[in-house]
Amino acid sequence: MEIFVHYPDTLEKQEQLDARVAKFHAEYVAQYIDHLKCPMEQKLKLIDAIAQTVQNNSA
């Protein structure tokens, strides 16, 4: 079986793809956390920890 991948051919299209992938990841993580069987306070702490990690890695 062959798989063909067509990468974006312009910077604008690459940025659009990057934004879509980021949105998908964020929604997946949010849904995953929402379904965890733990108190809301723990969920919020987890979200804060993720946000802090992202912020520290982008600096």
Image: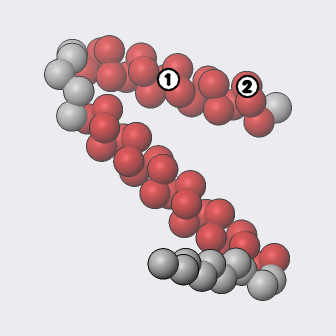
Q: In front: 23, or 41? A: 23
Residue beneath disc 1: 48
Q: Say few, some or many: other residues with alpha carbon within 10 Å of mark 2 (under 14 / 14 to 19 / 20 or more).
A: few
Q: Which of marks 1 and 2 is nearer the N terminus?
A: 1
Residue 4 at what x, y percent from top left? 60, 82
35 over 17 or under it: above or below: above
55 over 22 or under it: above or below: above
Residue beneath disc 2: 56
Q: Do the residues labelled 1 and 2 touch (CB within 8 Å)?
A: no
Q: Residue furthest left?
A: 37
Do we see residue 13 in this rendering?
no
Please state which amino acid type lies under the numbered disc 1.
Asp
Name the element at disc 2: helix
Q: According to the image, what is the colour scheme of the structure?
A: secondary structure
Q: What is the C-alpha distance between the residues marked 1 and 2?
A: 12 Å
Name the element at disc 1: helix
Say which residue appears at 46% left-offset and 57% top-offset.
24
Quarter of the image for the C terminus: give it: top right
Q: In this view, does 25 lie to the left or right of 16?
A: left
Residue 58 at what x, y percent from top left? 77, 36
